[in-house]
Amino acid sequence: MREMDEHYLHHPFKGAKRMWVWLTKDKGYKVSRNRIERLYYKVMGLRAILPGRHTSRRCKKHPVYPYLLRNLTVDRPNQVWATDITYIPMEKGFMYLVAIIDLYSRYTVNWSISNSMDAEWCTETLEEAIQMHGKPEIINTDQGSQFTSEEFSSFVLNQGIRLTMDGKGRATDNAFIE
C-alpha cells in the first residue's frame, strides 16, 4: 500500500488496473488484480483523476454540419484546417488544449490552453489563427458542443469558411488532429 500511495502521487491518472500492471510487471509483486482493486478503491479510497466520459458531447439543439472531406484531395496550404480539444491532467484537475492544424502541411497554425472548455475560447483561438495565417477554405471539427455552438459555427460561416464535422463516433475522420 505504501508503494501504491507513492506511485499514485506521481501518477494520479492510473486506475487500479494500471496500478496492478505496474506492481506485477515492473515491481515483481505476485498479487491478484482483485486484491489491488480492493486496496485501491475500498481501503485507500483512491480514484484515478480523469475527466468524465464524453468530454466532447454535442448539444442536441445545435446543428451538425456534413463531413466534406471524404474524397477530397488536400493539395495546398489553407485549403483545410482541423481542430480538436484534448485534456491535460494536472495535480488538481485538468487544463484543456485546443489545437488547429493545416491538413496539407500538418503545421500547427494555433493552439491555446484553458481551464474550461467553451465556445468562446475555441472561437478566439480560431480568430487568432486566421489573423496570423489567413482563412482556410474548410475547417473540420468533431461534434463537440463547443464546435456546434451558435457562437463558433456562425463565426466560421460569417468568415466565408465551409464548416465540416466528423461523423458520430468517427475518430478516424479527424485522425490527423487526434
Image: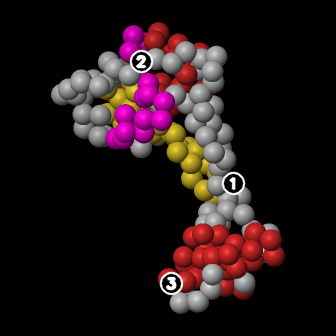
Q: Is residue 3 left or right of residue 112?
A: right
The kind of residue on which mark 3 rests is Asp
Mark 2 or mark 1, which is nearer to you?
2
- Tell which circle, 2 or 1, labels the residue nearer the N-terminal end: 2
Q: Is residue 118 visible?
A: yes
- In the image, residue 156 sits, relative to residue 3, either above or below, namely above
Instruction: State which region is magenta.
Output: 159-177
Residue named by callout 3: 26
In which image quadrant can residue 131 be found? top left
| Disc 3 to disc 1: CB gap under 8 Å | no
User: Between 110 and 101, which is closer to the camera in this rendering?
Assistant: 101
The kind of residue on which mark 2 rests is Pro
Residue named by callout 2: 66
Q: CA distance from mark 2 to mark 3?
A: 47 Å
Q: Residue at x 58, y 82 (%)?
A: 23
User: Between 109 and 25, which is closer to the camera in this rendering?
Assistant: 25
The C terminus lies in which quarter of the figure?
A: top left
- In the image, residue 22 sits, relative to residue 65, either above or below, namely below
- Tell which circle, 3 or 1, labels the residue nearer the N-terminal end: 3
Check residue 93 in the rendering and tell me which mark sits there, or answer none: 1
Q: Residue at x 40, y 27 (%)?
A: 140
The kind of residue on which mark 1 rests is Gly
Mark 3, secondary structure of its residue: helix
Mark 1, secondary structure of its residue: strand
Q: Is residue 139 left or right of residue 34?
A: left
